[in-house]
Image (cartoon, rainbow, N blue to C red):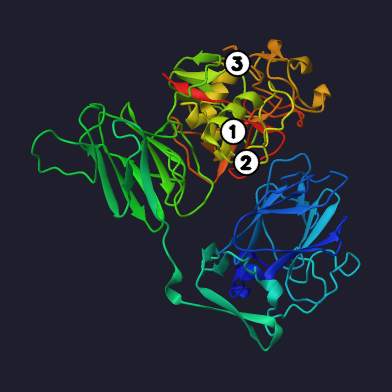
């Protein structure tokens, strides 16, 4: 049966009517409920607290810690599996998945020695087993594998296990788009018996997200601009009387801002930025805006040479440390004191270089990219440096980093993207784009490794080196790049500000997405057959003992 025909057959399906059941592995019989949001399936690690993950016990380590993603597809009316780049392949019905695979009841998902089965809920207490499954193609020629259980669950009433119940401080409501919202004005009440529940709520509870801009650098540093219109113009304030009026105006001292510099357009819950100046540029996280570009919470918008704006949701901590009514972890924190970190940085000159690798499907094609002049940290940010930031600001990490670290000169790890972003802002720097990172690593001659074209495990900390953990950042002086930058391969992965998207880039412009690019590989990875071009996707909430970062500074 074709995917479109199956979608039509399941047109009344709900993402929360499906689950994954462990039918082989250490957790046989365990059920993992699914939803409409993207989830990552991975191996559970010691002390694992990762969110938006399905964490499965696999002591044999045949499954990666981030093996594959699964998300509901409204067009197909089913969940779709998106495998990640891992050592172990992901298989559906014994066939390896390279790009994506729609899932239908009865499908087996194999990850190492763990096998999950995709099924609708309410099939009874006994999970399906391998013995109960019918292998081979279905009668209609499809590759589906069915268990023989009754798949008509429409007559069964949902129990309390089908919902996420509220804690003492929040109540949860699922909107039609299957996104989780937090509300305080609905009730859960018994119905029919003690296990069945219903949700009563007001229809007008849906609210749109509200955003604002904060000036973090510029003549009016600290000023907040509300974004309460569908279209908002940005520009330099005219001297004297003028009929021209901008919604967001800056004083004329910054002559690099045009009178009609840029505008914001709201479409639904999303804001887009358009550069309108023919003479002046606009940057988002260091990337030039050449076309209509969506904005995400925590993005930095540079207008002219001296003005930097932070785009964020309302309710986050402001740069002066004043707490709003909502106590959400802030995306950034700045300090009123001089906080620039005096640590060695290397100069990477502007100009073109060849980025990517034709032999790597995730980094192809090889293409020419232009970057501007930058300074980049010669070493990753260390535990000692990150502790100075935390002590100075009182920042609360999203990741599991704490001050009880071992090794002051070791790279900081167990921090999220926002944790790295917060430090970079405090240090008056920023995170590099992946193009800037790659040029700093491989130079202008597109070498495979920072030191050249020949593999040498003595020049980095990788799995081949058999070190078994991170090392001090100055331990590998012979492995530096053409710009004398250390640890560009091995030791830890490093966050970049670039969103993970297919190549080629168009002069540094990228398609923005939820996942960010990490670069370099770590002590946990075999890197002999990788290189400076190797890229991987990590979501902004992820952290681990193998992810760190370094900063860059514009001239």
Helix, strand or loop under label 2: strand
Q: Residue furthest right?
A: 131
Q: Tell me the residue that label 2 is attached to.
A: 538
Which quadrant, please, contains the N terminus?
Answer: bottom right
Q: Are marks 2 and 3 in contact (CB under 8 Å)?
A: no
Residue 491 spot, x, y in % from top left: 71, 25
Q: Which comes before the other along the chain, label 1 or label 3?
A: 3
Q: Residues within 10 Å of mark 1 (few under 14, many from 20)?
A: many
Q: Residue at x 75, y 44 (%)?
A: 65
* Foreground of the two, 366 or 259: 259
Which quadrant, please, contains the C terminus?
Answer: top left
Tell me the CA gap for discs 2 and 1: 9 Å
Helix, strand or loop under label 1: strand
Q: Residue at x 54, y 25 (%)?
A: 551
Q: Residues within 10 Å of mark 3 (few under 14, many from 20)?
A: many
Helix, strand or loop under label 3: loop
Tell me the CA gap for discs 2 and 3: 23 Å
Say which mark, if any, is on residue 485: 3
Can residue 382 be spotted in the picture?
no
Q: Which comes before the other along the chain, label 2 or label 1?
A: 1
Q: Are marks 2 and 1 in contact (CB under 8 Å)?
A: yes
Q: Tell me the residue that label 1 is attached to.
A: 495
- Horizontal side, residue 158 vs residue 309: left or right: right
Q: Which comes before the other along the chain, label 2 or label 3?
A: 3
Q: Residues within 10 Å of mark 2 (few under 14, many from 20)?
A: many
């Amino acid at each position: 049966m074709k995917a479109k025909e199956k979608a039509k057959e399941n047109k009344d399906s709900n993402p929360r009517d499906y689950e994954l059941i462990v039918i082989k592995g250490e957790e046989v019989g365990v059920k993992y409920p699914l939803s409409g949001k993207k989830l990552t399936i991975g191996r559970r690690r010691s002390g694992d607290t990762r969110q938006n993950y399905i964490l499965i016990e696999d002591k044999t380590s045949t499954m990666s810690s981030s093996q594959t993603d699964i998300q509901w597809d409204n067009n197909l009316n089913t969940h779709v599996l998106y495998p990640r780049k891992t050592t172990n392949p992901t298989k559906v019905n014994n066939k390896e998945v390279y790009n994506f695979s729609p899932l239908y009841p009865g499908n087996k998902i194999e990850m190492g020695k763990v096998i999950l089965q995709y099924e609708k809920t309410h099939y009874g207490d006994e999970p399906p087993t391998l013995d109960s499954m019918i292998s081979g193609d279905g009668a209609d020629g499809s590759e589906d594998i069915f268990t023989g259980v009754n798949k008509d669950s429409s007559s069964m009433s949902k129990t309390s296990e089908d919902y996420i119940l509220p804690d003492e401080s929040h109540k949860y409501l699922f909107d039609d788009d299957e996104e989780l919202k937090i509300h305080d004005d609905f009730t859960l009440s018994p119905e029919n018996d003690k296990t069945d529940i219903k949700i009563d709520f007001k229809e007008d509870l849906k609210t749109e997200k509200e955003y604002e801009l904060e000036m973090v650098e510029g003549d009016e540093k600290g000023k907040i601009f509300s974004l309460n219109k569908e279209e908002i113009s940005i520009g330099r304030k005219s001297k004297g009387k003028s009929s021209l009026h901008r919604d967001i105006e800056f004083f004329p001292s910054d002559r690099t801002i045009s009178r009609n510099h840029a505008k914001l357009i709201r479409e639904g819950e999303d804001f887009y930025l358009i550069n309108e100046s023919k003479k002046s540029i606009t940057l988002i996280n260091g990337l030039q805006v050449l076309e209509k570009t969506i904005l995400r919470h925590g993005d930095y918008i540079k207008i002219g040479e001296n003005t930097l704006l932070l785009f964020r949701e309302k309710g986050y901590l402001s740069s002066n440390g004043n707490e709003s009514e909502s106590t959400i972890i802030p995306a950034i924190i700045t300090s009123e004191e001089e906080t620039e970190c005096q640590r060695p940085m290397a100069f990477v000159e502007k100009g073109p270089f060849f980025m990517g690798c034709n032999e790597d499907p995730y980094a192809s094609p090889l293409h020419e990219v232009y970057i501007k002049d930058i300074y980049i940290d010669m070493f990753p940010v260390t535990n000692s440096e990150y502790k100075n930031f935390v002590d100075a600001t009182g920042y609360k990490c999203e990741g599991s980093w704490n001050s009880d670290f071992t090794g002051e000169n070791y790279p900081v790890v167990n921090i999220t993207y926002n944790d790295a972003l917060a430090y970079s802002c405090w240090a008056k720097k920023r995170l590099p784009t992946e193009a800037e990172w790659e040029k700093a690593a491989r130079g202008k001659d597109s070498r495979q490794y920072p030191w050249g074209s020949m593999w040498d495990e003595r020049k980095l900390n990788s799995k081949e080196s058999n070190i078994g953990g991170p090392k001090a950042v100055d331990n590998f002086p012979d492995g530096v790049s053409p710009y004398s930058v250390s640890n560009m391969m091995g030791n830890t992965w490093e966050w970049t500000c670039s969103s993970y998207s297919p190549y080629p880039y168009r002069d540094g412009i990228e398609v923005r997405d939820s996942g960010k690019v990490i670069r370099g590989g770590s002590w946990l990875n075999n890197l002999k057959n990788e290189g400076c071009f190797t890229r991987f996707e990590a979501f902004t909430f992820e952290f681990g003992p193998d992810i760190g970062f370094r900063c860059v500074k514009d001239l």
